Image (cartoon, grey):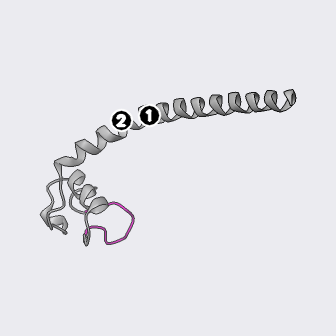
Amino acid sequence: MRFIVIVALIAVAVWYGYSHHLGRMRASDDATQQPVALETSQTSLFSCDGRTRCSQMTSCEEATYFLRNCPNTQMDGDHDGIPCEQQWCH
């Protein structure tokens, strides 16, 4: 009986240590992802407003935002992920 109690106590201690370790890992992951959230808030300078063509853009950054975030854009004819190559993103 004593053996079972000792094994149970060891199992509880291991479980507690593991869950504490996971909590610390999640906290460090949140800290490393914080700069990404800041970058996302900076791109809020643009918003999907129905524009779909290069002639409606004012910069490469704006065209890139629209290509990545907005539906039905017509700014990447060769489908290489770079919009408006002849006009904005040389």
**Residue drawn at (36%, 40%) of the image:** 36
Q: Quadrant of residue 38?
A: top left
Amino acid carrying mark 1 in the image: Thr
Q: Tell me: 33 left or right of 14.
A: left
Relative vertical location of residue 54 with respect to residue 29 in this rendering, above or below: below
**Residue drawn at (25%, 43%) of the image:** 41
Magenta span has 76?
Answer: yes
**Residue drawn at (43%, 35%) of the image:** 30
Q: How many marks?
A: 2
Helix, strand or loop status at disc 1: helix
What is the span of residues highlighted in magenta in the rendered image?
A: 75-85
The spot of residue 73 in percent (x, y) is 25, 69
Q: Main secondary structure of the magenta part?
A: loop
The spot of residue 61 in percent (x, y) is 24, 51
Q: Quadrant of residue 14?
A: top right
**Residue nearer the viewer, 40 or 57:** 40
Q: Are marks 1 and 2 in contact (CB under 8 Å)?
A: yes
Helix, strand or loop status at disc 2: helix
The spot of residue 19 in percent (x, y) is 59, 34
Magenta span has 83?
Answer: yes
Neighbourhood count class around disc 1 (C-alpha, 10 Å): few under 14, some 14–19, many 20 upward:
few
**Residue nearer the viewer, 8 or 83:** 8
Image quadrant holding the C terminus, namely bottom left
Residue 35: assigned label: 2
Relative vertical location of residue 24 with respect to residue 36 in this rendering, above or below: above
The spot of residue 76 in percent (x, y) is 31, 68
Neighbourhood count class around disc 2 (C-alpha, 10 Å): few under 14, some 14–19, many 20 upward:
few
Residue beneath disc 1: 32
In the rendered image, the residue lying farthest to the front is 1
Q: Tell me: 55 left or right of 32.
A: left
